Every structure is written in structure tokens, then in C-alpha cells.
Image (tube, helix red, strand yellow):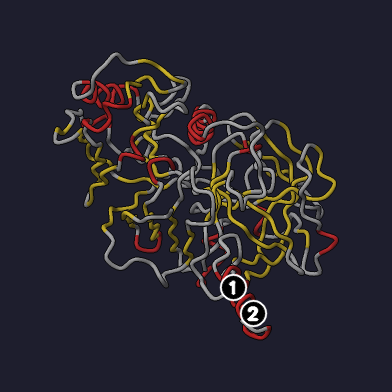
Amino acid sequence: MDFTATFLFFALFISSIQAVDPCGSRPQNKDLSVIPIYGRCSPFKPPKPESWVDTVINMASKDPARLKYLSSLVAQKTTAVPIASGQQVLSIGNYVVKVKLGTPGQVMFMVLDTSNNVAWVPCSGCTGCSATTFLPSASSSYGSLDCSLPQCNQVHGLSCPATAAAACFFNQSYGGDSSFSANLAQDSLTLANDVIPNFAFGCINSISGNSIPPQGLLGMGRGPMSLLSQSGSLYKSVFSYCLPSFKSNYFSGSLKLGPAGQPKNIRTTPLLKSPHRPSLYYVNLTGVSVGRVRVPIPPEWLAFNPTTGAGTIIDSGTVVTRFVQPLYEAIRNEFVKHAKGPFSTIGLFDTCFEAKAEVELPSLTLHFEGLSMKLPMENTFLHTSAGSRACLAIAPAPNNVNAAMNVIANLQQQNHRILFDVANSRLGISREACN
């Protein structure tokens, strides 16, 4: 091989590596990628080496605080993006999206939260925040918002003087055990190739507790300050995501914003709304099957009550699907009829057994109005690090939460396309290999 041929070979080889770089951006593809928080492309690293199932158990141990937070969300007056499954210092298992904030854009990995209405990021000078913060002084498009503006009336925990103009300052709790204080500001938000000018968000100046996402949060709820509301006609109140497994090493999931590129032949169920908890995405869960057996369930364990907020929600921030205690016990009791004991408890999972018996076990199917979601094995069972035991990967709702809510969590959503068509009040679910 002569010099020219050799040069061309290596040039083509290098360009081919760059073309398939799993960590690289894809500027021509609006359906960008998703990376688990502990993957090789993630900016977050685990606090200590551990098996992925131990990581999930550790993440899921924070679910009670998450459910307590969700139950506290009572009504008050007032384009595709990279996603990563995120735990690490978040203390609550979540997925993060890679965005750019400001002009020029500063990269932030913000938690994607379907149950929150407001965006916020830690700003420079923040007390108690992580090392990575947003620098308002470095952005030419940054501006603070004062109490006289309508956006200020949309945030909870507002603190404004009765007279005279002042900066819009507010306090909020998050995760059940943490809180922060912030000033309301606005700047350009870049999501892939889309730019949303004058995007309002909280510029955090102090935090307490360990559940505040270190690089901020992007609220995908239904409120007037959420991404859907602030993007207006750009995304037409439609988005979907496909969450990768926590075991995935490289970008592999996606967040689709807007109607373009959404699946056309997806089965849907009505998307319900509770005035008691207007941020949350409710669906009508009508039953659960273990194998071919429809579990006998009294209707009141499943009933949606818009007044009290009881019912079933889809949530991106809870790790393991939780059912109210009597419903969980009914599902578990039917499951153990088909499984071989003895059973043991590992972490929050109380139905663990010899893994070799898994091949003989029945699947779980969640029945919603208009569609059924049959959970694959990887969404139903977790194996211990040694692989000798497996656990049924659902749990009861904690006793200290004053809310009759069932929560379909992200472990069970993984490798499914979840479509939120808020404009047409429907939610779609279809199997998709995010990995």
C-alpha cells in the first residue's frame, strides 16, 4: 500500500469512528440520544463502585421522599434533546437532559421532571450548590424579572413586597427533604437546534438538603411556567421519551419535542387531570394481570378521583412502580402462587427468590383504558449482583404518604416510547428498544 492509499485509509477510518461516536452530538438528527447517568458519556460519576442492581436499590430507597413530594403538589394560586438516566449526587433517581442556557450557551445537564412545572438552575455564588453553576454575567441575553411581571405570579413560594418593584424571589421544596431559594430570571434556552428566547427559570442562590439536582431541573408538567407552556406553538404541548436502561453505557434513548416524528400507530389512553394536583399526568389504570390471571381488585383501589387526587400517575422521577398497599398485596399474593420460594427481602423488595426459577414465572400486565402494557422480564425483575437471586421489581407505596396514588415509575417505563399529547389529552405507550 503506497503513502497516498495509506493516508486515505486512516482518514476514512478516523472519520468513520467520529461518525458513530456514541457520545457525540447529532446536529442533523432532531431525535437526539439518551445516556444513563453512570454511562461512559455521562458527566456524573457514581460515589463508589457498585453493581447496577445495587445502584437501583439505592436509588429506589429515595422513592418514599419522592412520593411524599408528589403528594404535596396540591393546587396553589399563583425538538429532541439528549437524556441521561441520572442518580449520582441527585439522591433521587432521575433522567437528565443536556441543554444550553444563555448567550453563548452554557451546557447544563438538567433533570427531566414530568411532575414539575418550573425550571431552575444553580447560579454562580450559590450557597450549598455543586461546582457546576450557570454564570448570568457571561450571558448577553440574561435578565432578572421583578415582582410587577405576570411570570412572577406563577411561581409557588413567592416573596414580594406589597408595594414598589423588587426582584421576584421565591422558595420551593423538592424531593420531600430539600429546599432552595431563587430569583426568577429569563434567558435563551437551546434544545438541540431550537432556541426558546426569554425562557423564565429560577436562578438558585442557596439550597438545603441533598435532593436538589446539581445542575438544575426542567419542568415538563402542565403549569404556565413549564417548558410546554413557555415553548407555545413550537412544540404544541406534545412530547415523548424513550428511557434507556440504567445498564446502558452510551447515548441510546431520546426525548422528542413537538408533534413531528412522533409514532403514528401508537395505542393511547386518556390523559386525566386533577384540579387537586394539576401538575401530574394521571391515567386510568383499570387492572393488573399476573400471567393470564386478572388480579381481583376492588374498583376503589384504582379509581381516579379528581377532587382528592387519588388515582394513577406516570412519573419520570420515581424509580420503582408503587401501588397502594392493598393493591400491591393483591398483586404479590397472585405472583407468589406461580413462583417457587423461599422468598426473602432485599432492600425495599420483599419478593426475592432463586433466579433460576425466573424462566418459569408469569409476566405482569398493566391494563389502562384503551391499552395494555405487558412488562418484559427486564422491567419486571431485578437480579442481585451475584446473579443468584431475582426480585419482583415493584413495591408498596410508603405508609407515611397521605395520598392514594399509584405511580408508574421509570424502571417499568424503560425501553418504551411514552407519548404525552397534552393538547389532545392522551398518553401513548409502545415498546421501543431504547438500548
* Element under disc 1: helix
Identify residue for label 2: 6
Residue at figure coordinates x 85%, y 60% from the top left = 137
**Could you give the CA–CA distance between mark 2 and mark 1, rounded to whole angstroms?**
11 Å
Amino acid carrying mark 1 in the image: Phe
In the picture, the disc for residue 13 is 1
Instruction: Please state the horizontal and vertical placement of residue 343, each as a whole percent of the image.
Output: 32, 16
Classed neighbour count for the residue bearing mark 2: other residues with Cα under 10 Å, few (<14), some (14–19), many (≥20): few
Quadrant showing the N terminus: bottom right
Foreground: 133 or 279?
Answer: 133
Q: Nearer the N terminus, badge 2 or badge 1?
A: 2
**Residue 413 drawn above or below residue 320:** below
Foreground: 259 or 31?
Answer: 31
**Circle nearer the viewer, 2 or 1:** 2
Classed neighbour count for the residue bearing mark 1: other residues with Cα under 10 Å, few (<14), some (14–19), many (≥20): few
Q: Are marks 2 and 1 in contact (CB under 8 Å)?
A: no
Amino acid carrying mark 2 in the image: Thr
Q: For residue 187, what is the image quadrant?
A: bottom right
**Residue 29 drawn above or below residue 200:** below
Foreground: 160 or 112?
Answer: 112
Side of 292 relative to 234 (left or right): left
Side of 317 relative to 380 (left or right): right
Residue at figure coordinates x 20%, y 35% from the top left = 289
Residue at figure coordinates x 56%, y 56% from the top left = 226
Instruction: Please state the horizontal and vertical placement of residue 232, each as a whole percent of the image.
Output: 53, 68
Foreground: 177 or 7?
Answer: 7
Instruction: Please state the horizontal and vertical placement of residue 393, each as a whole percent of the image.
Output: 37, 31
In the picture, the disc for residue 53 is none
